[in-house]
Amino acid sequence: MEIGVPKEIKNREHRVALTPAGVAALCARGHRVLVETGAGEESGYPDREYRRAGACIVPEAAQAWAAELVVKVKEPQGCEFAFLRPGLTLFTYLHLAAAPELARVLCRREVCAIGYETVQLKDGRLPLLAPMSRIAGHVAVQMALHYLQLENGTACRGRGVLAGNIEGVEPLNVLVLGAGNAGCSAARVAAALGCAVRLCDVNRQTVARLSCDPGLRHAIVEPFDASRLPQWLEGCDMLIGAALIPGARAPKVLQGALLERMHPRAVFVDIAIDQGGMSDSSRPTSYADPVYVAHEVIHCCLPNLPSCVARSSTQALTRATLPYVCRIADRGARDAMADDPALRAGLNVAEGHVVHPAVAEALAQ
């Protein structure tokens, strides 16, 4: 099969869908991989490494998009819609619940679109979302700490506070909403830095399991209770929004007035922004303009947080996606999904229709 790897063009998106090692694995199975020139440059993988791995380096995006299977990181941007066509299998993060226009175009062009974020194992785990979620949680805390500084390179000056672990310095109060991969990663990093962490989730089984997690032994882990949100937000320095309902829009549990209970110039990082965000004051930002202030709280709503650690993210993403890419390339999308329920669960659009139930429900609202 011919597999295309276009260069990512979303604002400040530095990742690439496959490492040279991933390309080599596909070429060894007899597939032809077309990598757009410069696609891996920002992740530290120059064209020559892909060429050595067996890839054909193509100068134009259209050539990579002409492949039967196109593997990406982020959803197609408006200027890439022209490349969408019947017979194309697209394998990437889609997040269609927050992208109705893209969903309509994918349907109209009869693309077979499989979303990394909805590939789901029998036990409910999301193997292709998990690595990026863990990285996003880690980066979210780093970002929050950066913007809590008085001097942070923007006009949004933070409170001028440290995480903790310094004698005589009060630890930061951190609230993490959602105890999935992103939320747990954020909570562990914040706790390790000496912050006073509260991690909440609607799933009581998850809460019970995480209560015994050694990385969270100094954190408070408890069930989410909307009636207690005002109390939890009182004097909060760092808020991480990490709730996830696979395929669906993120729950809007944070009304603007609630955020006013946080310290002025505190930081809210909404990891759930790629699914619509958790607050009515959340709107997508970019690395070119990453933060804004609403309700006296600095908001950081980057839909591609892992992009700032592009090399690590690309390595983790390839490790997770490559077995599925190989399966699709070896057997074709239809047969690969017929034999693999997890991959089949990732199917978002087929034959002109949105076929993932949660995505369809979100788009109908």
Image (spheres, rainbow, N blue to C red):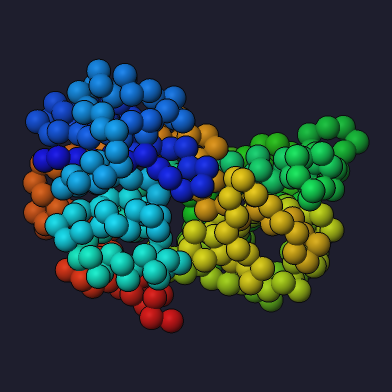
Instruction: From the top left corner, tell me how far across and down residue 97 is, in percent.
Output: 41, 68
| Between 234 and 281, the one nearer to me in the picture | 281
Instruction: From the top left corner, tell me how far across and down residue 91 is, in percent.
Output: 27, 50
| Between 287 and 230, the one nearer to me in the picture | 287
Residue at image x 76%, y 74%? 257
Query: Is residue 314 among what the camera can see?
Result: yes
Residue at image x 84%, y 58%? 264
| Between 333 and 11, the one nearer to me in the picture | 11
Q: Quadrant of the C terminus?
A: bottom left
Please say if 126 is above or below 46. below
Instruction: From the top left corner, tell me how far across and down residue 154 is, in percent.
Output: 76, 45
The answer to whether residue 323 is left or right of residue 232 is left
Outermost right residue:
168
Q: Count the labels in the image.
A: 0
The answer to whether residue 169 is left or right of residue 306 is right
Please say if 204 is above or below 289. below
Residue at image x 25%, y 41%? 64
Query: Is residue 207 among what the camera can see?
Result: no
Please say if 211 is above or below 256. above
The answer to whether residue 129 is left or right of residue 84 is right
Instruction: From the top left corner, tell me how far across and down residue 326 is, in percent.
Output: 18, 39
The answer to whether residue 260 is left or right of residue 282 is right
| Between 347 and 83, the one nearer to me in the picture | 83
Residue at image x 38%, y 45%? 73
Q: Quadrant of the N terminus?
A: top left
